[in-house]
Image (cartoon, rainbow, N blue to C red):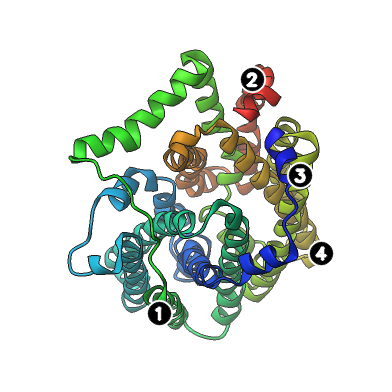
Amino acid sequence: MTQIADIKQEKPTRASVWKSFTQPAAWTMFFFGFASGLPFLLVAGTLAYWLKDQGIELKEITIIASAGMAYALKFLWAPLLDHAELPLISSMGRRRSWLLLAQVGVFAGLLAMSFFTPSQLGLFIAATVLVAIAGATQDIAVDAYRIEIAPVEDQGALTAVYSLGYRIALIVTGMVALIFADHIAWSSIYQCMAVLMLVPIVANLRAKEPEYTRHAPATWRQAMQESVIDPFADFFRRYGWQTAGLFLLFILLFKIPEQALVGGIMSPFYVDMGFTKTQIGTITKLYGVWVGIAGVFAGGMAVARWGVRGPLFWSVLLTALCNLTYFWLIANPGNLLVLTGVISVENFALGFLGTAAVAFLSSLVNRQHTATQYALLSSMVNLPGKVLGIFAGGIVEATSYGTYFVVATLAVIPAVLLMLLLWKKMGPTQTQA
C-alpha cells in the first residue's frame, strides 16, 4: 500500500507520458508482444480444434495440447539466457540473439506443423513441442529485454504496449484462425501464422540491444547457484520454513480451477455443444478478450482500493464457481446467448483474478531476486492445473464434461482453506515486504 501511495504522489507530466509511449522501445515491445502471443494458442486451444477436425480422440487431444506446459517450465532453462552466448549471432547482443533463435524456432515449427499435419502424428507432435519450447524461450527473452531496455518509470508504458500486441495476437490466432478454418485448410492457416512471425523477426533485427552490463558468474555451477538456489533459499529465510511452505502450497493450488480449463478440453467441448468455429472464435476469442481486459482493469482498481488479500480471495472463489456455469451451456447446446453469458462471466473473473494474482506474487518477491523469484513462482502457479488438463480428456471420456467441471470447481477448496490459514500473513505488512 505504501508503494501505491508513492505512485499516486508522483504525477508525471504530459510530456513524460508522451515520451514513454512514443520512444522506439515502445514500438519494439508492441511487435515483441505480438510475437509472444502468436504461438500460445497455436499449441493449445486453437490446435485442439484442428485435432478435433481430424478425428483425434479427446484424451489424445488434451495430451498433445499439453505441449503448452513448456510455458510453465520455462524457469528450468531461463538461466541459459542470462549466462550463455550463442555462436554466430552473438554480435547482435545476448538478448536479441536469444530472441532471434526463439523466433526462428517458432517460425520453423509452425511451418513444420503445416507440412506434417496430424496425419503424420509423431512428426506433428515433435513440431508442436518445438513451437511451445521456442515460444516459452521467447517470453523469457522478451521479459529480460523489456526490463533492461528502459528505466523503471517507463516500464508501465512498455508493458501496456506489449500487452496490446499480445492480445492482438490472441485475436488473430483465436478468432481469425477459427473463422478461416470454416473455409480453408488448417495447414494453410498455420502457414499464414508462420508468415506473420516474420514481422517481429524484422522488428528484432532493427531493434536496439539494451545497454546493460551484467556480472557473469565464472562457472555454470555458480550461475545455477545465483539464479535458482539462492532465490529459493532467500524465500524460506524471509518467511520461515512453515509459512513459506504454506505459501508455496497455496501458489500451487489456487489457480487449478482456471488452468484445468485452459488446455485442449474446451475446444472439443464447444464443438460438441453444436457451435461453429466462426461462432466460437467471435464470442470466445474476440468478445471474450475484451471482457477479460475489463476484468483486468476492475481487478487493478480493487487491489488499489482494498489491497491484495480481499480481491484475491473473492476472485479465486468466483473463478472456480464460474466453471459451474458450463452446466447452463450443457442444458442449452447451440444457444449463442447462453454462450455469450457464460464467456462474459468467466472471462471477467479470469481478468480480475489475473491482476490480483500478479499483485500477490509480486508482494512475495525480494527485489534482490525479482526476475528469478517471479519466474519461479509464476511457473508454479500454472503447473498443477496444466497437469490436470493432460488427463482432462480421459476423465471426460470415462465420465462426462459435467463431472470434469465439478472436479475443477471442487479443486478450489484446499486453496481457500490455505488462504484463510494465511490470512494474517497476507496483510499490509506482508505486501509491503
Q: Which amino acid type corresponds to the residue marked 4 in the rendered image?
A: Leu
- Spot occupied by residue 347 in the image (x, y as percentages of width and height): 71, 54
Disc 1 target residue? 202
Query: If you read the primary sequence from the N terminus, does the residue marked by circle 4 or circle 1 appear first?
Result: 1
> How many C-alpha atoms fall within 10 Å of the one at disc 3: few (<14), some, or many (≥20)?
few
Mark sitting on residue 337: 4
- Spot occupied by residue 95 in the image (x, y as percentages of width and height): 35, 60
**Visible in this render: residue 64?**
no
Real-space Cα distance between discs 1 and 3?
40 Å
Query: If you read the primary sequence from the N terminus, does the residue marked by circle 4 or circle 2 appear first?
Result: 4
**Visible in this render: residue 348?**
yes
Element carrying mark 4: helix
Disc 3 target residue? 9
Real-space Cα distance between discs 4 and 1?
42 Å
Real-space Cα distance between discs 3 and 2?
27 Å
Disc 2 target residue? 425
The residue depicted at 45 percent of the width and 34 percent of the height is: 368
Residue 141's image quarter?
Answer: bottom left
Q: Are marks 1 and 3 in contact (CB under 8 Å)?
A: no
- Spot occupied by residue 391 in the image (x, y as percentages of width and height): 46, 44
Element carrying mark 1: helix
The residue depicted at 75 percent of the width and 31 percent of the height is: 310
